[in-house]
Amino acid sequence: MINAGVTGASGRMGKLIIENIIKMEGIQLSSAFDLMNIGKDVGEVAQIGKLNVNISDVADIATVLKESKTDVVIDFTIAPATAANAPAVAGAGVDLIIGTTGFSDEQRATIEDAIIKNGTSAVISPNYSVGVNVFFKILQETAKYLSEYDIEIIEAHHNQKKDAPSGTAMKAAEVISETLGGKDFVYGREGLAPRDKEIGIHAVRGGDIVGDHTVLFAGDGERIEIKHQAHSRNAFASGAVKAAIWINNAGPGIHTMDDILGF
């Protein structure tokens, strides 16, 4: 049985991840962390019934992980929090599933260095949906044949999302750029400058949109649009819990959803 911890346990994604943990076989909740509701039963906070796991102060994360014999921590919080918590988790010898996006280069380096230095395992992905990761593969194949087309990425999310463009949009741009040997990105378009061969990325924020991503390949006389729409955050939460089960048998180092899906 894999013991899993969850950071941001009082938040929307934290609660959904906990729901998925208690539904799946082979994994159980052993610890929960947040800056609020400390000392309360996390199941009661999530309104899913008592789980006999109290929310701990994230400042005590290393100690609690050892006492609870947690094997893996799932972190879907915000970039500064993950950058602070991940080294403590790795330092405790615990594996990581990271779904946080919006890292600076320095934050990403801090996280990766801690994982490698401590010989732990981690999956770091901007999106744990199986569909989105198939979407990336489709983009990779499409770009091979439409390299001369103009490429624009349009993403839409709810009005509380912290980062823009989304990590998924950035990953899509990176997949396409790598396939085509390197293309620059431009975020939004303003002014009268003529379009070059850069990849355009556009962010929309409004209402309660879970996550829409459209990639437009526009040529002379035709265009192809490839789209992924998330109807529920459960696709992300269930994928992250499956990753937490998978990593139990993975070797040390940093992994991606490509490794999990066998791409």
Image (cartoon, rainbow, N blue to C red):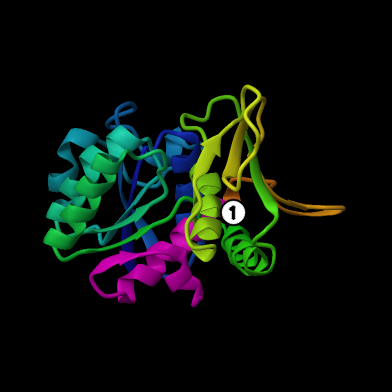
Q: Is residue 162 left or right of residue 215?
A: left
Can you identify the residue that label 1 sits on? 235
Q: Position of residue 73 (x, y in %)?
A: 31, 53
Q: Which residues are magenta?
A: 236-263
Circle count? 1
Can you name the residue that lies furthest to the top here? 191
Q: Position of residue 179 (x, y in %)?
A: 53, 65
Check the picture and name the quadrant holding the N terminus. bottom left
Which element type, helix, strand or loop, lies under badge 1?
Answer: helix
Magenta span includes 13? no
Identify residue type, mark 1: Ala
Residue 229, position in %: x, y?
70, 48
Q: Is residue 102 left or right of residue 62?
A: right
Comparing 77 with 107, the one in front is 107
Viewer-proximal residue, 157 or 140?
140
Query: Hey, which quadrant is residue 61 in on the image?
Result: top left
- Few, some or many residues within 10 Å of mark 1 (<14, 14–19, 20+): some
